[in-house]
Amino acid sequence: MTEPAKSAAATLSFGPFTVTPHARLVTRDGLALALGAKSFDTLIALMSRPNEVVSKWDLMGLVWPGMSVEEANLRFHIAALRKALGDGKDGARYITTLSGRGYCFVAPISRAEIPEPPRPAPRAELPPVKLPNRLQRMVGRADAIATVSDKLVTSRFVTIVGPGGVGKTAVAVAIAHDLIETFSDAAHFVDLAALSDPDLVITSLLLMLGLPAQADDPMPALLAHLQDKRMLLILDNCEHVIAAAAPLAAEIFQAAPQVHILATSREALRVEGEQVYRLAPLGVPPENRELTAAVARTYPALELFLERAAAGGARIKLDDSNADIAARICRKLDGMALAIELAAGRVEAYGLEQTATLLDERLNLLWQGQRTAPPRQKTLQATLDWSYELLSELERLVLRRLAVFAGHFTIDAALEVVPDEQVDRSRLFDSIDSLVAKSMVAPRPIGAMMRYRLLDTTRAYLLAIADDGSALAARHAAYCQRWLQQAGATWATLPSADERAIHFSALHNVRAALDWCFGAGGNTAIGIALAAAAAPIFLAMSLLIECRRWSERALLAIDPTARGSTEEMHLQAALGLTLMFTHGGSEAAHSALSRALAIADGLGDAQNQLQLLGRMHIFHERIGQFEAALEHAQRSLGVAEALGDAASLALAQSLLGVSLHLGGQHRDALTMLEAAWRGPGTERISTVYGFDHRNRAGISLAREMWLQGRPAQARQLAQQTVAEAAQMDHPITLCIALIWAVSIDLWSGDLDGAEEHIDRFIAHAESRSMGPYLAVGRGVKGELAIRRGDAKSGVETLRRSLQELHDAGYELLTTTFNIALVEGLLALGEIERSAQLIDDAIRLVARSGDHLYMPELLRMNGKVLLSQPQPNIEQAESCVREALELSRRTGAKAWELRAAIDLATFVAGGGEAKRTLRTALEGFAEGSDTKDIKAAREILNGL
């Protein structure tokens, strides 16, 4: 079938030559010239702008749309064209070269109308499909391709929007190849990237379609040509010529109902009919030190990184030990496909870890990519240069200033930091809106508020070209300080990590501000106040090393005249707590906490007195001074009662309950701990004190329940407190919950449960460099080995652990480890050493005050006496009876049952043994079932 012939078609003439564009024909005196396709396209491109200089870049963009070619290709076809035309012979001059500028068609051109022969149906009339090759394999874009394809088929006009290097063109080309049969092979790709003149947009399209481009107003002819055509039109890289591309696309969409338009741009075209699809970066693994290789491989950014690194010759064996390093690279590059490919190309030379280090030290924007890449995508620098040059002067200035923000920021933050005499506040909103639209600033809703951020690659680029920003950095640091002071009080009371993430997202800004404040040319006065305000957030996140670093730096910078200030109090308090958790009961930790408490006393600051009494309480517990810890807890109760609010009272009850528990005053401890766990205001006991005191009260209450004969409830509560601590995502709180949960497992005889809890404990302690806790974890491992029959290994491990803990001044678990060590020594037959150790342990408890374990020590002393070469049965029985009596008097039913079991071996007649065992068992809650209960019932059955 053919279409009806048009009445006439345009031809162009110059010298002896006639050019028929729609037939792609050049004749001389009626004879066709043998011109190649690219030579013909070059001629048409030059003739479309007679007597104008066409730059080599514009010319290559018109002749090779969507492709990256060497300049030598253009020179070859110019030479071929001149030879075919006889340019320069017998005085003929058609094309001139202007060195360094481009080429110009200089011959006079005339136009004529000739009858047009019948032409075939639309499919035959259209020139061959011109699509770039699609990627052999696309990573992580299947959903995007499917979604955009559906939109394109149903809505006809879609623009893929995103920052440079995210992969917009690759996705568009893949879609075009997938849909080419839908459009009967009529798909045309127009790469606008090489154009510097917006007027060339329509010319590029005309040339692609094989239409003449010399008319003053070619739009009517273009629309007439397209109005009955069914085709897919891809307009790639519209952003720099958007003023011409947008109305052109809109006109085609309205006039040609069967033409489907797919555009790519760093900002939306914003015309009627357009559907915008914002292409997100590739998914990256979250920050997680426990990331496994299997999980990491499920993220497309890392999958692309590994594939491109392997293609570049690198040999990466991804495993659990290096998965987080690869993930860190992908996060640093924000999941941007181009950036990931460029970094992956460095792995063969530098290795995985060194590549990550180089990126952390400085994003290298000049790493080279593929030779065939378009010039704007050969390096990150070129990509960012391209985007930056498209901005207005005001947008550039605002963007450079926004680079002061590390991580997310809010509009309120920008309004506080960016404006000055050069940037009016009222124009800042418009600038940020425009930068978001142009994909230079990424929006992200967090909670109910929209936040913004620059990609790390964009920020690194801007910081390299920014002017001196001392005033800007000072405004930024001062804003961070004010914001911390206003909002910081609520952070630690938020129960879940997701809720706290809304506030924690600003932490990168705080770090950047602190770096500037204490760096060369910074403002230490702002830095001191900022470090003091930041300490609670660092503690709430268990960022102990970081908190210690900034606290120490700020304290060194404090002027002697400012000593005794609120800032010094907060810094000393933070320093003391971080030293305590990272280095144990050091004198430096005690000195810092004491100084902070003295300042709070001097200022009459009751709220901070309570906080610091809590820290002094746990400090003295950790160094094994339980009586001193009890005194601080008792004092805290008085301060809390004076303050009168429920949260303060719950905190003091938690402190006092723990001290009474460790002091062996079980009935009073139960009352206090239940009040702290369940009473009004307990939900407000916060991690601002370094850990969650309500959670600590809960796990201590679980231990009390176990000791007082409610093992099932105890284990249920222990599981609850561990789960809640994990949900809080607060490692110190979770470590405290886990280590006390381990004690319940061990008391109950659940060795597998104990091992599971202690492994989690060790992992979290390692993640926050909590040295003393690592020694605690190893000590528990030693105790487990003894319980499982490997006494030799267990004793050696326990001894090393105890020595480490003594060196660190950590004595909280000394007694319980001593009891385990005695059991191990007895198993090894080292009776004399066990006898000496049990005597020392009893004296230590009498002196330090952790009377919780005294019944167990007395009972173990009885075992040691029975194990002597000449057993002292009478004295052994006396020790066990004393343990039994002490357990009954203090209400420790679990210890009472153990003493009753041991006493059964001494009593000659079965009557007393039965009565003692039955009395001990009667105190347990119904349904209780522990290793000790089973043993007692077995003995009763035997009697």
Image (tube, rainbow, N blue to C red):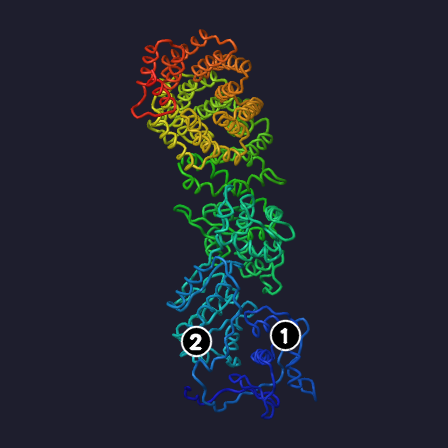
Quarter of the view holding residue 742:
top left
User: Does residue 938 lie above or below 491 as drawn?
Assistant: above
From the image, which quarter does the C terminus lie in? top left
* Element class at badge 1: helix
**Left or right for 553, reference 156:** right
Residue 130 image point, x, y percent:
52, 74
- Please give the residue where the numbered disc 2 appears in the rendered image: 184
Residue at 69%, 85% (x, y): give it: 88
Let me know if residue 53 appears in the view.
yes
Q: What is the three-letter code of the residue carrying label 2?
A: Ser
User: Does residue 916 lie above or below 772 as drawn?
Assistant: above
Q: Sequence-wise, which precedes: disc 2 or disc 1? A: 1
Q: Nearer the viewer, mark 2 or mark 1?
A: 2
Residue 329 image point, x, y percent:
56, 49
User: Does residue 139 lie above or below 742 as drawn?
Assistant: below
Residue at the left extreme, as displayed:
926
User: Does residue 551 lie above or below 586 as drawn?
Assistant: below
From the image, which quarter does the N terminus lie in? bottom left
- Mark 1 Cα shell of 10 Å, populated few (<14), some (14-19), many (≥20): many
Let me know if residue 565 appears in the view.
no
Decide which of 505, 166 is in the foreground and name it: 166
Residue at 43%, 76% (x, y): give it: 184
Residue 415 image point, x, y percent:
47, 47
